[in-house]
Amino acid sequence: MLRRTLLTLIACASLLTPLRALAGPVDDLAAALRLPELLRVLVEEGIGYGADLEAELFPGAGGARWDAAVEAIHDPARMQTQALARLHAELGARPEEVARMTAFFTAEPGAAIVKLEIAARAAFLDDSAREAAEVALAELKERGDPRLEQLDRLIAANDLIEQNIAGAMNANLAFYQGMIAGGAVDATLPDGEMMADLWSQEPQIRQDTIDWLLPYMVMAYRPLADADLDAYIAFSETPDGQLLNRALFAAFDGLFNTLSRDLGLAAAKMLQGQDI
């Protein structure tokens, strides 16, 4: 049930409130980070994930009813509202820091980085793009390219591997909770047994995270000059960068937990033949 919450920062969908119409430093930051555009990609990822769940849990039996449920769960307006609310909670009392964050991502190289990250994430909706990125990563490793050291520094600065693993495991727990609420999993299942099952997935989640993250970063940052990527790493290591990193993980982990629980509940109802 892995749901990636990749922070490395990732036009507006018509269903979303244009962020420029909102007021306040946090809304300006969200606009600089192209939040609505990112959410469009997350909606597409979620719909694909819903198809995977159908194939795993009730192959061929979901049909239009399941498709409609998955689309309703991934309502972009609701997703934007939740993500923005959490960003306001995390950053609303820090206007000076937020202003500096916004300045970084509205100037260069920050603005270009945001565009590249969104484009790479959208490209990864196509398996062939991911395969090409995996080949590019292998080539970098074969020649010992210095870009790999830069990527390692960016991963370390934002704690991307451990944060993504924690987010994925929490999303898996939320899915379990949704299944329990829907009656598809025994509500009397001991917490220890449930947690043991979740932790048994950690090695595979870790490997999946690494296997996704590194090719993604190779693709996203390939057009960047080394100096521009160094500037991004330097920003990520500042107190402002660390604050933003924590706020974005909090916002998107919370969002994915909500989506995962709702998917678990909907899947449980499908398994029991109930109306979703």
Image (tube, grey):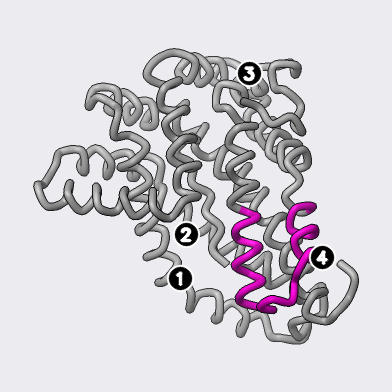
Separation of disc 3 and disc 2 at Cα?
A: 29 Å
The tag earlier along the polypeptide, 1 or 3, is: 3
Q: Which mark is residue 165?
A: 2
The tag earlier along the polypeptide, 4 or 1, is: 4
Separation of disc 4 and disc 2 at Cα?
A: 31 Å
Separation of disc 3 and disc 4 at Cα?
A: 38 Å
- Between 64 and 72, the one nearer to me in the picture: 64
Q: How many marks?
A: 4
Residue for badge 4? 65
**Mark 2 surroundings: few (<14), some (14-19) or many (≥20) residues within 10 A:** many
The tag earlier along the polypeptide, 2 or 1, is: 2
Residue for badge 1? 202
Residue in the picture at 70% in, 33% down: 84
**In the figure, 184 relative to 258: above or below?**
below
**Mark 1 surroundings: few (<14), some (14-19) or many (≥20) residues within 10 A:** some
Tell me the SS state at disc 3: helix
**In the figure, 271 relative to 148: above or below?**
below
Residue for badge 3? 28
Q: Which residues are magenta?
A: 46-72
Residue 275 lies in quadrant: bottom right
Identify residue type, mark 3. Asp
